[in-house]
């Protein structure tokens, strides 16, 4: 689902990317609001926003508003194949999980992370000494914000239903961006092509379903493990870009993509390291 989402964001031709981000996730949040009403969880949801307003706001703003705006804008600057750079999230997850959640890190995890970093260098430079593309830099930055929010969500979901957390993540994350998008352009809805609205609604539904399922998974397993499992989505987006948009990655970039993919795949298959008892 995430791979398809990336492809859709790339092909939606709308200049104000912040408004596109705000609209997409506000709709996704409203969809989950309706789902919570149907499931009879809405009263619990209202109670949780009073009890955990700061944590839910952190998840919404730090975990959605900032990084998704970065990704949406980055896709207007870089080819879809470069979204493999988002897989650096596995490394951020490993570090933050160790610091904040006290998850253990093995030497093998460190070596595989270094291998992934080398692959990232090949993707961004294509084997030459040149300045990094701004879009690529944004792809490397966004996962840090995702993980800063996920570590908070991981703990919060021990007492709050994941679908409620995702609902507030999207509602707060999307609605927060509307004032900023208005500063960049007036007549936002008038500027939005009618034929793109169906794609945006589909994109919102996809994000609502995909993130709800993923957060249920995060609740059950280690955050670093859950993050690593999501390595396949750039493959789907890249295949769509090559087949439909005609993108053609260079040989060096393909080698870098393979290195990142295999390193992160191996990371995802590693057994978790048990915490040592004092």
Image (tube, rainbow, N blue to C red):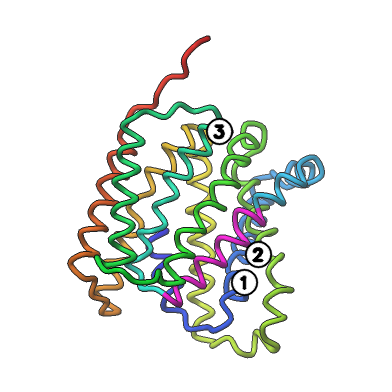
Instruction: Write the residue at 48% across / 61% down.
Output: 206
Looking at the image, residue 203 lies above or below residue 143? below
Q: Earlier in the sequence, mark 1 or mark 3?
A: 1
Quadrant location, the N terminus? bottom left
Height in image: 72 above or below 2?
below
The disc label shown at residue 174, or none: 2
Q: Which residue is mark 1?
A: 23
- Foreground: disc 1 or disc 3: 3
Q: Residue furthest left?
A: 251
Q: Is residue 87 left or right of residue 195?
A: left
Look at the image and give the residue range highlighted in magenta. Answer: 60-77
Q: Residue at x 50, y 82 (%)?
A: 196
Q: CA distance from mark 1 to mark 2?
A: 6 Å
Measure the alpha-carbon separation of dots 1 and 3: 34 Å
- Sequence-first tag of 1 and 2: 1
Q: Are marks 1 and 2 in contact (CB under 8 Å)?
A: yes
* Cα separation between marks 3 and 2: 29 Å
Predominant SS of the magenta segment:
helix
Q: Within 10 angstroms of label 2, few (less than 14), some, or many (20 or more) residues? A: many
Could you tell whether 205 is left or right of 1 in the image? Answer: right
Which badge, 3 or 2, is on the more N-terminal residue?
3
Label 3 environment density (alpha carbons within 10 Å; few <14, some 14–19, many ≥20): few
- The residue drawn where x is 47% and y is 71% is 74
Residue at which label 3 appears: 99
């Amino acid at each position: 689902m995430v791979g398809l989402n990336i492809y859709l964001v790339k092909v939606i031709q709308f200049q104000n990317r912040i408004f596109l981000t705000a609209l997409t996730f506000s709709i996704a949040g409203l969809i989950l609001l309706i789902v919570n009403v149907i499931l009879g969880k809405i009263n619990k949801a209202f109670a949780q926003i009073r009890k955990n307003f700061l944590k839910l706001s952190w998840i919404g703003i730090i975990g959605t508003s900032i990084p998704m705006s970065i990704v949406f804008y980055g896709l207007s600057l870089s080819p879809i194949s470069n979204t493999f750079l988002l897989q650096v999230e596995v490394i951020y997850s490993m570090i933050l999980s160790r610091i904040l959640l006290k998850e253990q890190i093995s030497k093998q995890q460190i070596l595989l992370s270094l291998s992934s970093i080398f692959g990232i260098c090949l993707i961004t430079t294509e084997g030459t000494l040149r300045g990094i593309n701004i879009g690529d830099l944004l792809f490397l930055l966004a996962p840090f914000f995702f993980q800063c929010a996920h570590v908070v969500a991981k703990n919060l979901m021990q007492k709050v239903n994941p679908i409620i957390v995702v609902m507030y993540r999207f509602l707060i994350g999307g609605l927060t961006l509307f004032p900023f998008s208005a500063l960049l352009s007036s007549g936002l809805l008038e500027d939005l092509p009618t034929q793109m609205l169906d794609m945006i609604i589909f994109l919102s539904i996809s994000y609502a379903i995909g993130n709800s399922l993923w957060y249920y998974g995060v609740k059950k397993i280690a955050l670093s493990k859950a993050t690593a499992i999501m390595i396949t989505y750039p493959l789907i987006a890249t295949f769509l870009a090559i087949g439909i948009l005609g993108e053609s990655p260079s040989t060096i970039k393909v080698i870098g993509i393979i290195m990142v993919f295999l390193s992160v795949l191996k990371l995802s298959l590693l057994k978790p390291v048990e915490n040592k008892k004092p």
